[in-house]
Amino acid sequence: WLKLSLRSFSALCDNSRSLPPLPGFMADLDLLAPRYGFGVSWDTVSRKVDIDLQCVVVDRAGAIVDCAYYNNLKAARGITHSGDERLGKPSHVEEIVWANLRRLPEHVDLLVFVVAAYSGGSLQDVANGQLILFEEREDQEVTRFAMERSTGAVDVVAAMVRGASGWGLRE
């Protein structure tokens, strides 16, 4: 995902055809409900690391038009960030970005989800990092997958893509 070429990025944003196959992507998951939450949970290993979840909103031309993160909780009329959570929640899902797909402007075709180690280390300093997709509510988990423990401070982890037949998730 991190090594997307400009051509691949343009293909992601082109909704005139079905979603293009891209090497390295897992199978698409169709998103049929109007509202989804994308969450992150983790444990720290050797240092206290604050992981932040962000959602970058991209139009069909490939331009970034908005972003939701800890200091900008609303974006593009359909994205809501839960806010920065540093102490942990009982559900162990520290941050969630909710996307109301029906409220997004028609020119928005791509939501890119990014995790960043804001303070205290890098992504390799967290254990049990999980990315979780919820449908409609936090108690309706659709899927979860492991967060990569890379040496970097930022990773693109998934995308919601509007295709000819509707929205899909790429992880």
Image: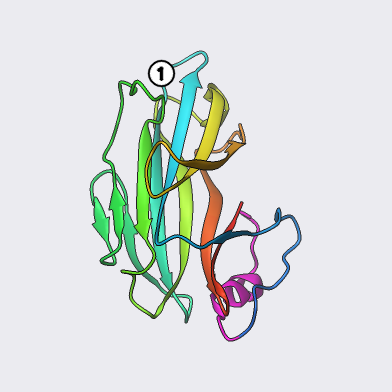
Q: Quadrant of residue 116?
A: top left
Q: Quadrant of the N terminus?
A: bottom right
Magenta region, residue range: 1-16
Q: Quadrant of residue 9?
A: bottom right
Identified at 51% across, 13% down, the residue is 46
Q: Quadrant of residue 40?
A: top left
- Which residue is identified by label 1? 48
Q: Is 27 on the left or on the right of 106, as rendered?
A: right
Residue 15 magenta-highlighted: yes
Q: Position of residue 22 (x, y in %)?
A: 72, 65
**17 w.r.t. 45: above or below:** below
Viewer-proximal residue among 126 and 6: 126
Q: Is 93 on the left or on the right of 141, as rendered?
A: left
Viewer-proximal residue among 15 and 140: 140
- What secondary structure is marked by label 1? loop
Amino acid at pointer 1: Lys
Identified at 47% across, 79% down, the residue is 60
Viewer-proximal residue among 41 and 125: 41
Q: Is 23 on the left or on the right of 79, as rendered?
A: right
Q: Position of residue 148 (x, y in %)?
A: 62, 36
Residue 95 magenta-highlighted: no
